[in-house]
Image (cartoon, coloured by chain):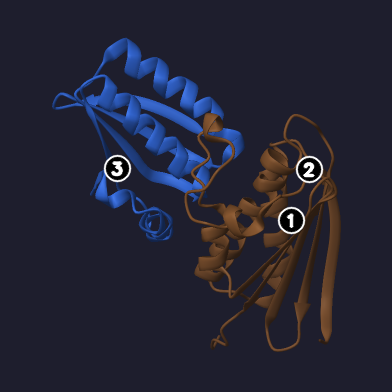
Chain colours: A brown, B blue
Amino acid sequence: MEILNEIKFSLPSHSVNESTARAVVSSFLVQADPTVEELSDIRTAVSEAVTNAIVHGYRGSFGKVDISVKLLAGREIYIRIKDCGCGIPDVKKAMEPLYTTAPEEERSGLGFSVMESFMDKLTVRSVTGKGTTVTMRKRLKVHGR
Amino acid sequence: MALDITSENGAAIAHISGEIDHHTARALRTDLDRFIIAMQPDILAIDLSGITFMDSSGIGLIMGRCKLMKECGGRIEIRSPQPYIRRVLRLSGIERLVRIT
């Protein structure tokens, strides 16, 4: 995959940084001239993944959330969001719609469903006790100026 | 994020503006619950016209208030979500439980 541009950054797992992550990713992707809808989709998917890292990965503790965004040839966006938290024991179960391990925080259990719906491809890799890596891809439409 | 609550024809209307995510939902939850418990309105309409971003944390927020309103003998309505917010709402299936106008 030919990388045209990329950005990597890390944020402490404070919930206020959910909006920071969205803002940085949005700013970086403006150069690819996405539609408003595409940018909304990507912002939402990033927000879900970062929130999962903060709420579930680092539940009751703090750590770093690593975010990598690549702009690839063919108007494809690659995003990787990684935490070194507790990991997900059963990824398949966690990806079921409405499944949540934090009902007390009113988590709707829709985070992965939103990521799947708003992006073209979603991959979740997790090791219990070591952390979770979420990878998402989305190809932007070619549109006239 | 800002919350203003007004009254219109017997319904309470919660005008929320700004972004709803996991971080901002906490304060909204506290403020809305305080109002619902104190005032016990028959209808609480959540006006989303001023929302510029909402992820699934917003769904959790609405579902939680829906449950509390039901316990208090009332119901929730959602008003004026922008098209993008409507997509998030549709994905959750919340339209089956809450009237959206």
Could you tell me which secondary element the residue under label 3 belongs to?
Answer: strand
Could you tell me which secondary element the residue under label 1 belongs to?
Answer: helix
| Amino acid beneath label 1 | Val
Point out residue A22 in the picture as x, y percentages from the top left corner.
Answer: 67, 53
Mark 3: give few (<14), some (14-19) or many (20+) Cα within 10 Å.
Answer: many
Point out residue B86 in the picture as x, y percentages from the top left corner.
Answer: 37, 56
C-alpha separation, residue under disc 2 versus residue under disc 3? 36 Å
Who's the residue at 48% across and 21% down the image? B30
Q: Chain of mark 1?
A: A
Point out residue A43 in the picture as x, y percentages from the top left corner.
Answer: 61, 58
Q: Earlier in the sequence, mark 1 or mark 2?
A: 1
Point out residue B81 in the picture as x, y percentages from the top left corner.
Answer: 35, 51
Number of marks in picture: 3
C-alpha separation, residue under disc 1 versus residue under disc 2? 26 Å
| Rendered-image quadrant of the N terminus of chain A | bottom right
| Amino acid beneath label 2 | Cys
Q: Is residue A85 left or right of residue A94?
A: right
Q: Is residue A113 left or right of residue B48?
A: right
Residue located beneath label 2 in the image: A86
Q: Chain of mark 2?
A: A
Q: Do badges 1 and 2 share one subunit?
A: yes
Q: Is residue A145 above or below residue A11?
A: below
Could you tell me which secondary element the residue under label 2 belongs to?
Answer: loop
Residue located beneath label 3 in the image: B78
Residue located beneath label 1 in the image: A24
Who's the residue at 37% across and 34% down the image? B15
Q: Nearer the viewer, mark 1 or mark 3?
A: 3
